[in-house]
Image (cartoon, rainbow, N blue to C red):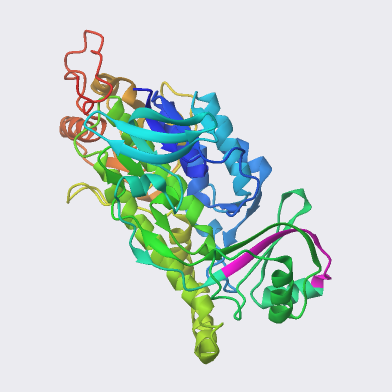
Amino acid sequence: MDVDVIVAGAGPTGLMLACELALAGVRTRILERRTEPQRDSRALTLHPRSLELMDQRGLLDRFLPLGRTVPGWHFAQLPTHLDFSALDSRHGYTLFLAQARTEALLEERARELGVEILHGHEVVALSQDDDGVEVRVRAPGGVGTLRARYAAGCDGGRSRVREAAGIGFPGTDETLTGVLGDFAVTGADPAALEAARARGVLIAPLEDGLTRLVYVDPERMRVPARELVTLEEFRASLIRICGSDCGIAEPRWLSRFGNATRLAESYRSGRVLLAGDAAHIHFPAAGQGLNTSLQDAMNLGWKLAATLNGWSPPGLLDSYDEERSPVARAVTENTEVQTLLAELTLVPQYQRPGAALRQLFDGLLRMDEVNRMLAAQVSALGTAYPPASPGTDPLVGRRMPDIGLTATASEATRVYELLTEGRFVHLDLAGDPDLGTAVTGWGSRVTAVTVTQREDHADLEGVAEVLVRPDGHIAWATRTVDIAARRDERHEALTAWAGTPYRHPAALTDEPPALPRDPLAGP
């Protein structure tokens, strides 16, 4: 095999996935059709859960100084914003950061971890057999073939990998389009810009003195997304919408985008997996696309690495589709609702009831409970995966709160600082003197910590032990008081999630045996 995994696409999703794989020692190569890094940025935000993921890998300090934080975000461009600061997170805010900057930071990290990134390499075909995947690639030197044990399609909504793997992409076609433009000059006075905002034009300052304007023109909202945008069209639409062209000049980028909404029938076909826009597309309402994609990569990375490193418990890799596909479905439904709330006010016969509906929704957003519910959805802080079996603790599947702690054998002061190596973290909150011996059977897969003092958190009241997955979600928790019974539960949970131990914890005398890198790869 040339490498363990070939990742198609060097956007944020592919780069994040490659970082996760390389962190676990998986040989990874990214193939990117573009010859140069992306300059223009469709996405502009990192939401709270994405920031938590960066924190868990020790990367947040690279991102925060380059962006601008805001305490919330919009829902369907309604006047009342979602309040992320009210949520249970150290990062209750949106980081306003251009996608191109996010890509550059993730590429820097991927190269640090030894990921090979090949620009100007386009995947043109793909096939798989029992031992691996064969990828046909068009490169500057011609067309050639590469092999890997697995391939990941992170190559966008028109994914060649998805098509080659025969994975369906059902959904709805585009019925509405909007337009965005990044301008070096916007010469309108503040009053004109405020008038534009009041008429639904999104105006956002970017890096390098650029300003982005985004709108949906009722007279042009059925124009296909493939039709190029001109400066003349952009200016005429602004005048029609808000009575001013906002002084725009010198566009650096003009683009049209649509509301086509699709979800892959499966995120996996044998040795081929999908993530990001290759698995789901939707209208860019509330900036959820890039963030959902980063979270796909975080979920997939450790599971695919576990499979390749030989310790994956049965069904772990299949759980990627089982967990992430429902999340994407919820996001697509959420964005369809937001799109409808905007579109109703643009169609003449629906303008009056559409405005009333938006007023109703805005009133609901002023209710704390409703605002928190929708903020949790959009920020992805509310994402919880269903437990593998009934009767488990209510915490299972939810994100682990980043509580402050004092722990033995660790300099960490927060839970997320324990996750930087991409391993399971087992927290003993009640005290078991034999914890270290009990967990040794799983070697470097699990970091075990006895917590001597911790920050109070209502959700953890009465919890004796908790096993945190590499992606920061809770795999197992127990409130059992009896230590002997708790040890049995612990061994069962560790085996179910971190695989069979090298040997039973009671007999720890030899070095652990080498494990095959991929049990599916054959001899």
Q: What residue span does the magenta drawing correspond to?
A: 178-190
Whether residue 148 sits left or right of residue 341 in the image: it is left
The residue located at (40%, 46%) in the rendering is: 160
Q: Which quarter of the picture shows residue 355?
A: bottom right
185 is within the stretch colored magenta? yes
Tell me residue 274's x, y (percent): 36, 45
Whether residue 522 sits left or right of residue 277 in the image: it is left
Q: Which of 518 and 489 is in front in this view?
A: 518
Q: Which quarter of the picture shows residue 214?
A: bottom right
Task: Relative to 155, say whether 493 is above or below.
Answer: above
Tell me residue 273's x, y (percent): 33, 42
Task: Relative to 514, say whether 456 is above or below.
Answer: below
374 is within the stretch colored magenta? no
Q: Which of 265 and 64 is in front in this view?
A: 265
Q: Quadrant of the N terminus?
A: top left
Tell which residue pokes out farthest to the front in this image: 142
